[in-house]
Every structure is written in structure tokens, then in C-alpha cells.
Image (cartoon, helix red, strand yellow):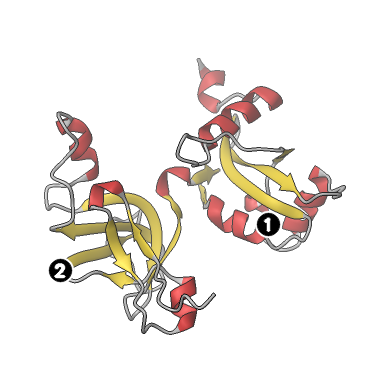
Amino acid sequence: MGASEITIAYGQTESSPVITQTRTDDPLELRVSSVGRKLPDVEVRIVNVETHEDARPEEQGELRTRGYHVMRGYYNMEEKTSEVIDDEGWLHTGDLAVMDEDGYVRITGRAKDMIIRGGENVYPREIEEFLYTHPEISDVQVYGVPDEKYGEKVAAAVKLREGSGLTAEDVQSYCRENIAYYKVPEYVDFVEEYPMTASGKIQKYKLREAAIERHKLKSATVEST
């Protein structure tokens, strides 16, 4: 379209709102596959979610940022503020990311969306990105649902392309052939639309609630009470 100087920016309301951004002179590959590098006078670090130590290049962790751009806090909500801004002033974004040796960042998911299945960490975005490669799948949302034995299992809400006759077993077989067994969705539901917020964000918690009701699921804690 001739719009040669479009860039990608990443951030959130709490960070005023941009943390990283691609530059117009970045290589095209990085301009379309990353959210760029940190802005001037902004600090960014990737922290391993298990060890809480700085992640190595290309190792996934939570993106944290510090600097002039970070909010002072949520209005009249000191406790909520302390949950996202630590004593050293780092804003915990809740976003999972990797950073390469040159400082380019790729967002890989949300920490709160992580599924823990029998002690294995499962990242929904990884499974979603894989399922997008299926020619008959138009869109997919992956999330965790409670399980009495494993704590959580993987579930997927799938939108099919028009005319597709794909079944849940087809989706699961496609996964079994290409990804680890514990990442294969135990439950596959086909939907026409996703529940959305007023701003257009998909409400995964509503998909989770619907799956729990549809499949009559119970958590391990329910069994023990």
C-alpha cells in the first residue's frame, strides 16, 4: 500500500502506553516478527516465571519494565498497585516474551493464561499458533479447564472455515502427530463466535466457564471437600 514507515508498538495502559517499538530502518523480517526494542530511557527485562531470575536470550519469561513511562499507581488502590509494581519500581506486565541478543522482543502469551497440567507448564499461545497452521481452522482459543487428576487440562474453542467437516478427533489427531502429548487439547468445542469485551478482547474466562458446564468438569479441590 506504499505505507513504508508503519511501525509496531507494544505496551499497556499502565506504561503510558508504549514500552517497545520497531524502527523504520529495522530489517523487514524484524519489523513483522517482533515488537521492536525498548524506547530510549526505558528499562526492559525478561524474568523467568519459575526462578524469578533474568532470562537468557530467547528464553521465555515475564516482561517487566521500569522508567518514566510507568504509572504512579491505580487511583486509590494501593494494594492493587503493589501487585503489579514491585519495591524496585518494576512494572510486572503479565505478558510472556522472549528477547534476542540485539534487544528485539517477541510477545509469546500471557502468564495468567498458562496451564499447569500435572506439573507441566503449557502455554496456550504456542498451541494456538500451531493450530492456525491447519487449513480448515479459521481461529482458535486455547485455555485451561479443571481436572480432578492433573489439576488442569487443555481445552480449545475452534472456529472452522466455511464448508469444513473437521471433528474434535481430527483436531486432536493433528496435534498428536506434531506436538507433545500433554499439549493436545482434551476438549475441543466448535464455536461460531467468541465472547468479547466492549473493546473487542476475547473473554477466555467465559469460554472456560462454558466448557466446564458443557463437559461437567470438577477440580481436584472439589473432590476433596
Q: Does 223 sit left or right of 17 as displayed?
A: right
Name the residue carrying label 1.
131
In terms of image quadrants, where is residue 10? bottom left
Q: Position of residue 51 (x, y in %)?
A: 32, 56
CA distance for labels 2 and 1: 39 Å
Quarter of the picture holding the N terminus: bottom right
Q: Does 133 sit left or right of 111 as displayed?
A: right
| Viewer-side residue, 22 vs 46 | 22
Structural crowding at the residue carrying mark 2, measured as other residues with C-alpha within 10 Å and reported as few (<14), some (14–19) or many (≥20): few
Above or below 212: residue 154? below
Q: Which badge, 2 or 1, is on the more N-terminal residue?
A: 2
Q: Position of residue 141 (x, y in %)?
A: 61, 46
The answer to whether the residues at label 2 and label 1 have Cβ atoms under 8 Å apart is no
Q: Does 181 sit left or right of 80 as displayed?
A: right
| Viewer-side residue, 111 vs 201 | 201
Q: Residue at x 40, y 76 (%)?
A: 5
Q: Position of residue 22 (x, y in %)?
A: 36, 73
Above or below 131: residue 29? below
Could you say which disc has been placed on residue 41 in the image? 2
Q: Secondary structure at mark 2?
A: loop
Above or below 50: residue 80? above
Q: Name the residue furthest top.
A: 225
In terms of image quadrants, where is residue 104? bottom left
Q: Residue at x 65, y 22 (%)?
A: 213
